[in-house]
Amino acid sequence: MPLLDALTLGFATALTPANLLFCLIGVFVGTAVGVLPGLGPTATISLLLPITFQMDATASIIMLAGIYYGAMYGGSITSVLINIPGEAASIVTCIDGHRMAKQGRAGAALGMSAFGSLIAGLAAVVGIVLIGPPLARVALQFGSPERFALVVLGLLLVVFIATGSRLRGLVSALVGLILSSVGLDIVSGQQRFTFDTAYLLDGVNIVILAMGLFGIGEVLADAERRATKAELLAAPTRTRELLPTRDDWRRSAGPIGRGTVLGFVLGLLPGGGGLISPFASYLLEKRLSRTPERFGQGAIEGVAGPESANNAAVQASFVPLLNLGIPTGAVMGVVLGALMIHGIAPGPQLYVERPELFWGVIASMVVGNLMLIVLNVPLIGLFVRLLRVPAGILSPLIVFTCIVGAYSINNNPLDVVAMLVAGVAGWLMRKARFEPAPLIVAFVLGTMFESSLHQSLAMGYGSAWILVERPVSATLLGIAALVVAASIAASLVAARRPTA
Amino acid sequence: MFAAIEGRALGLTDLGSPGPGLFPFLFGVLLTAAAGLSLCVDLVRVRRAAGPDDARRQTPATDGLGRDRPDDHAPGGGARVLGYVSIAAAITAGMGWVGFMPAAFAGLLAMVRGIERMPWRTALLTAGGAAVAADLLFVRLLKVPLPAIPL
């Protein structure tokens, strides 16, 4: 089918009143779910799956897709306002987004998050239409050795996330790596650091860890340092201050473009590529910036890049599923289930046999992203007004929301206890001037590090040569070696330079 | 150090491939080294800052590393931290005994009135409103099985 005809069919499908309604329901529910910590898109889509049994297949996938990218935007709202990431992918937005809120620039952070997500979403749709299917086939060549090399590169760069001492950033990152090894060893099944408790067999939950370190840790640190009735955050009063300025746009244009490309490519990769896209974007922007010291202090690039990467990755993750029938993550696995319930086997034949579904879902992403902007931008003023709530009310509500959010993940009170332990650890880290961000990023990468290494060794029949025999993994490992060499050289030059 | 010791006990290799303890061991060793180095760097800086030529740097407004120390010790701050953690733990434990709504209401009231010293009316409205809103949103709408009041 010619591309123009295919797009016409897609928009004709997406713009029917019923599909528009389900798209609206999807993005609305998704935003709400994203705002609530704990209840992520995987759980929500699973909960809503039975509802889709009676629906048309196209409408159900349009709604589920809307929930997914709506949740990604919703997660950034709480990250910016109260330092609680609604989703694992929103963790990195806490670093600069919440700092901007503390400076009275919550509106600009939320606005840039929304517009960045829109631009990335629309660009990702264009990417899907033009190069998505062939790129998805190439992405499948990206196996465990390549993923291992990518994770190694990410781990080497993780200390650069720290705004203060790199040594302290390294300590934080190593704690995150040790935490990622808690649970059953994936090869031998041996228990590691479980203290003979069944609770820790599955390891530490990323959302619980993030809610504790960022949300509870921040409340405790704030409770310790402020006078009882002080305001928690500065809130702008004029409407003009609620939206990004021209300077914000100038600073964010590059990060949005790079974040979109990075997120799109990583979103195509199986095995959690989309999850690391905001972290990768943040690291990239900090490395490219002429003023990296602004990162962590409220740099809008630290919001624009990761949020764009996040949204582009979400949209791109539909390509391997719809084109090749391969889910790239847990959410896509549930969407695959929804398709199969309707008797649809996704794969190369999908856009021959069911073109209205394939192109309808793609076109609905354009419509859904526009709906997200229409729904959320007018509400930015309302969200920001939340910051005027006295800290004496806001702090207890944050703690309470975290408790309910942590409990709702597995309906297990031990999750709340784990979150409180992480919260106290986060508070102590702040007191000792260790930053939680490198810990969280290393934790995410650490879980992928071991699994991809073991899979690579299995692919190479026990030989580690497979890591350097394949061109992409060899290139990535080469870049990692260059990063190490450049850091050592920079340290030596700095040590020899006479102090003023 | 605990991670390194435990990792070694788990086994560093397994039939020629990485054993379950290899990475915890490596991460533990690296963490011990990095933490030790960080401690040494801080001690050296504090000692330098305390030198007679630069005594002004160790004023109460700096942290001994030459950086401004934020005012992170408001009067009663430590007690408020302890209060928040204790009440959050009590809400979690109380949910199983008295149900979600009463535990949430009592816990929020204790935080808003007891820790934050907000007026009684504000505290009651906040606690009641948040407990009811959470019940409506999570239990009624999203079907999260939060513990019900035992009858």
Image (spheres, coloured by chain):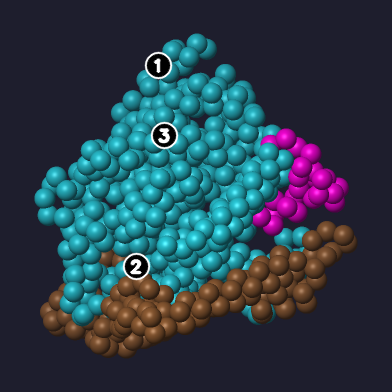
Chain-order first, disc 1 or disc 2: 1
Task: Spot the brown chain and give its letter.
Answer: B
Nearer to us of marks 2 and 3 is: 3
Q: Secondary structure at mark 2?
A: helix
**Residue at label 2?**
A401
Lateral position of residue B9 relative to residue B86, left or right: right
Question: Total marks drawn?
Answer: 3
Q: Secondary structure at mark 3?
A: helix
Lateral position of residue A385 relative to residue A113, left or right: left
Dot label at residue A257: 3
Residue appearing at x 58%, y 33% in the figure: A320
Which kind of residue does numbered mark 1 sit on? Thr
Picture colour for chain A: cyan
Q: CA distance from mark 3 to mark 1?
A: 27 Å
Residue appearing at x 60%, y 49% in the figure: A486
Q: Bounds of the magenta span?
A: A448-472
Nearer to us of marks 3 and 1 is: 3
**Residue at label 1?**
A8
The chain that hosts pointer 1 is: A
Lateral position of residue B118 relative to residue A216, left or right: left
Residue A156: give x, y in percent of width and height.
60, 54
Q: CA distance from mark 2 to mark 3?
A: 35 Å
